[in-house]
Amino acid sequence: MAASLPKQVKIVEVGPRDGLQNEKESIPADVKIELVNRLTDAGFSNIEAASFVSPKWVPQMATSAEVMAGIRRKPGVLYSVLTPNMKGFEAALAAGADEVVIFSSASEAFAQKNINCSIAESIERFRDVALAARQNQIRLRGSISCAFGCPYQGEVDPASVADVVKRLRDLGCDEIDIADTIGVGTARQVQHVMQLVAQDFPLNSLSGHFHDTYGQALANIYASLEVGISIFHSSVAGLGGCPYAKGATGNVATEDVLFMLQGLGIATGIDLNAVVDAGQFISGHLGRKAVSRAGNAIAATRAA
């Protein structure tokens, strides 16, 4: 392993929330609970389990309270939920969330199209949530979408990403995600943005959230490792898609990320075989094959 690469990496598993929320057919709460429990048993230290948003906009997340009440919790594991406003925060608090996630965009066009306000206004909307999180000693994570490109405006200025990082930092975020929402980022671009934002926020508290629309997610993760990023988001079985880019495969598959990291000798504390099993479980329920080359290859080899 190259000396410049981190020796250990934290994987934030986002399949139960960011992945499943895109599914059109309703998934029973007990299936979601089983998935989270399998991921807990696999050794993840942080699982994005639910989202307290309006069922009108994200009907798949309507069972989030039931899911949070039903999962088997493991000490030391962070169970995160997305909270768009104070109503969502109050539901997250009642559900015993360990971490709440707030979100903005590095693209003004994306912010206007999706949340009908400017970036600055979106940050202001989260001020009460951030304060409540501190008062209740709940971890606060911020997520920045369209950090490497936007479906509406095209290129995104790295300075815009840095500006949003500073705004989320000032709200008190413990961790900030730099997300390639439509999967257009490339390795050198990713390194430039990560190094730039690290001037305003601790490198070890920045995370990479990469989509694999153009097949660049693993390359972008490796590029991020080279500049010291040690937190990444991924989705079991490649769950999820991107509604803003035609044909997008969405989140990078956790199995593929773990296989790469294992080959690099980078510790994660996660059992790859258990993740493959979890991916096969949820893919079987959805009636399709997992979007994970490594996971499918491992499963096929074991079945042979």
Image (cartoon, helix red, strand yellow):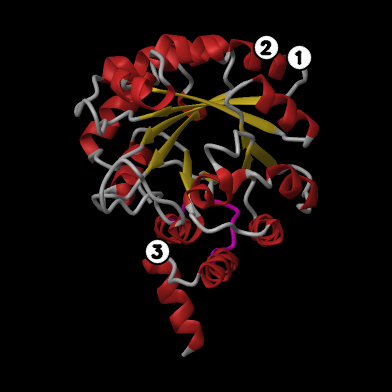
CA distance for labels 1 and 2: 6 Å
The disc placed on residue 42 is none
Tell me which label, 2 or 3, sits earlier in the chain: 2
Considering only vertical position in the picture, is 270 above or below 160?
below
What residue sits 79% from the left and 46% below the top?
69
Considering only vertical position in the picture, is 55 above or below 194?
below
Question: How many residues crowd around disc 2 within 10 Å: few (fewer than 14), some, or many (20 or more)?
Answer: some
Question: How many residues crowd around disc 1 within 10 Å: few (fewer than 14), some, or many (20 or more)?
Answer: few
- Nearer to us in this view, 86 or 16: 86
Asked if the magenta segment contains residue 268, the reply would be yes
What residue sits 40% from the left and 64% below the top?
292
What residue sits 33% from the left and 25% below the top?
110
Q: Secondary structure at mark 3?
A: loop
Question: How many residues crowd around disc 3 within 10 Å: few (fewer than 14), some, or many (20 or more)?
Answer: many
Segment tinted magenta in the rendering: 265-272
Asked if the magenta segment contains residue 43, the reply would be no
The residue identified by callout 1 is 135
The answer to whether residue 213 is visible is: yes
The residue identified by callout 3 is 291
Figure label count: 3
The residue identified by callout 2 is 131
Q: Estimate the x, y position of residue 175 in percent, counting from the top left.
A: 54, 26
Badges 1 and 2: C-beta atoms under 8 Å apart? yes
